[in-house]
Image (cartoon, rainbow, N blue to C red):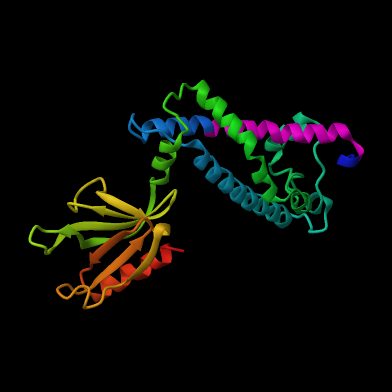
Amino acid sequence: MASPDGNEENIINWVDFCEKHAKTAATNFAKSFVCYASSHTPSSSTWEHKEFLSKFIDSFVEHFENELLTLQDRAIANGASASDPEVNGFHPPGSTREGADFFDQNGPDNKSPKLFQRPFFRRLSFKALKKGKGFFYRQVSDEADGNGAKSMKFDKSSKTRLAKIVVECRKEGIVNYMIGENPDGTQKWEKCRLALVKTVGGYMLEFYSPPKSVKPKSGVFCFLITEARETSTLEMPDHENTFVLKAENNMEYVIEAQDSNDMRSWLATVKYCMR
């Protein structure tokens, strides 16, 4: 079979093969995204598609590379040697149909698929795949419009909402936090459920008051916190196991933990997430 350098038609055909399957993947993901967005968010909210797409591309590259190596190793285990051209070299298919037929040929009689070759993909560089996100962006945008996704307004407010989508809870517990002063000048404390969560936009501390509330009363992104430390006896003479978090815009959060171990655990977790 002719190499890409010796046969321009072969080059075009394998490029068409890649574009064909990329378009299929983009179409499927766009439809899935629209369904997910419509069923997982209130009608008053909107979703920013680019963050989802970025994660999809990164995950696709990782899973594709793993699957590629797994299938190649399987081909070697089934009889092909490491020096076999079928394993150690890649030749783009001679036609678009031949490339498509690959998925029908991966049976007992075809133990060394020609597409699963390391050298070619090393030259391709998986990092370079991320540079092709523009194609997927266009495909998602067109498909979303075709499905009537009227709620997709890619504005600043939608990005803010997306940034706060919780994907993981790192730590959670009941604490007291200072919310100001009483009329007599004494400190005013409130019991709340404090949660440190990982969101699309980064780690975030959320204060739920009362503790059983579904929505947080307030919150702060950990990357905005500039200082996290224990309070001194002079600062909090009547409260033990307290720590203070100072954030940008002169924001300050004074929190009283359950005990000294709980306080140290909170501080360690917050400091880690400030990075």
Q: Quadrant of residue 153?
A: top left
Q: Nearer the viewer, residue 258 or 180?
A: 180
One can see residue 70 in this view? yes
Which residue reaches farthest bottom?
233
Q: Is residue 91 left or right of residue 127?
A: right
Residue 22 is inside the magenta segment: yes
Q: Position of residue 131 (x, y in %)?
A: 67, 43
| Residue 70 vertical placement versus 259 (above, below) | above
Looking at the rendered structure, the number of numbered marks drawn on it comes to 0
Tell me if residue 17 is in the magenta stretch.
yes
Q: Position of residue 42 (x, y in %)?
A: 33, 32
Above or below, 190 against 138 in this view is below
Residue located 71% across and 36% down the image: 18
| Residue 223 vs residue 147, the one in the foreground | 223
In the image shown, does 48 or 140 lie closer to the viewer?
A: 48
The residue that appears at 64% across and 34% down in the rendered structure is 135
Whole-percent x, y for residue 232 in the image: 25, 77
The segment highlighted magenta reads: 6-29
Q: Quadrant of the N terminus?
A: top right
* Residue 220 figure quarter: bottom left
Q: Is residue 142 left or right of residue 256?
A: right
Please report the residue visible at 43 percent of the width from the left and 58 percent of the height from the top.
Answer: 223
> Can residue 101 be seen?
no
Residue located farthest toward the right when viewing the structure as drawn = 6
Where is residue 91? Give x, y as percent: 82, 43
Q: Left or right: where does residue 181 sit relative to residue 33?
A: left
The vertical placement of 154 against 174, above or below, is: above
Q: Name the residue at 70% across, 47% down.
A: 128
- Magenta region's main secondary structure? helix
